[in-house]
Amino acid sequence: MEGEVQSTAVGFKAQLMLIFYSLALSATVFIIVVLPGSSLLENIARLNSSNIYVAASSWDIPAFISLPCFLALIYALLLRLTQKATEIRIQRCVKVATIFALAAIVFRIPYGFAISHYMEAKGYSSCVSYTSPALMSPAVWVRYPTYCIENTGSVRRSLLEWIDSSVEAGKSISPEDLKRKAEQLLEEYDRKERETFPGVYR
């Protein structure tokens, strides 16, 4: 026996809250599997094909390590919802969740250093201009330093999308081609900014 099942009935409002939290955690699991998973596969393919750039995240593998944490919490909520929760079962769920959450956080630090050393060993250089300042955003690495065009942060997404579409079309991109495209995108961005905020540019 794993302790006595909690006999306290769950009210309708509490049931809705348990269902809501279960769905929210399930959505988190889905997002972790789909977004970091697909991004990881894409960038492995870029690296294997010696692409112009690779967006290497220090959070993808730690995110996968954290999955049992969310699954354990979902299981605990379902136990409570179906009135099959016992103190021992809940404690086990909390223990599993805590262990994997801590493991993900602890693994993140050496994993980040390992990625940096690996990318440098592959001959790639970090490009701050292409890397989003947002928390947990992947760091962008370029095959040669000349592919990192400075002061392109405002158009980084459009520039990387152009690189992807050009590579998919089988086009060869030189640093000069990339610089010209960056200048074109910056001019277009500046024009739109002036049209949107005319008072600022008087």
Image: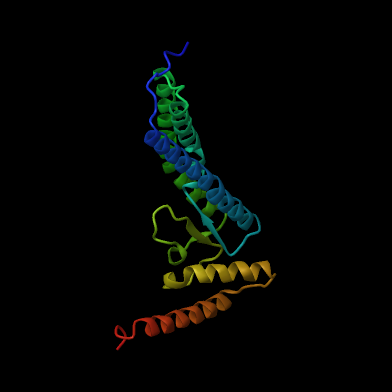
**Tag count in the figure?**
0
Tell me the quarter of the picture where residue 153 sits. bottom left
Do we see residue 69 in this rendering?
Answer: yes
Q: Identify the residue at the far right of this view.
A: 170
Q: With respect to residue 17, does 130 lie above or below?
A: below
Q: Quadrant of the C terminus?
A: bottom left
**Residue that appears at 47% across and 55% down:** 138
Counting from the top left corner in percent of width and height, residue 16 is at 42, 38
Task: Please tell me which residue lies in front, 67 or 107.
Answer: 67
Task: Please tell me which residue lies in front, 181 or 142.
Answer: 181
**Residue that appears at 38% across and 31% down:** 11
Do we see residue 150 in this rendering?
Answer: no
Task: Please tell me which residue lies in front, 98 or 22.
Answer: 22
Counting from the top left corner in percent of width and height, residue 27 is at 49, 45
Q: Identify the residue at the far front of this view.
A: 12
Horizontal placement of 38 versus 107: left or right? right
Counting from the top left corner in percent of width and height, residue 111 is at 47, 43
Horizontal placement of 120 versus 173: left or right? left
Counting from the top left corner in percent of width and height, residue 166 is at 64, 71
Task: Please tell me which residue lies in front, 111 or 42.
Answer: 42
Q: Identify the residue at the far bottom of this view.
A: 202
Q: How is colour applied across the structure in the image?
A: rainbow
Q: With respect to residue 200, does 28 lie above or below?
A: above
**Residue that appears at 55% across and 45% down:** 33
**Residue that appears at 40% across and 34% down:** 12
Q: With respect to residue 153, does 184 lie above or below?
A: below
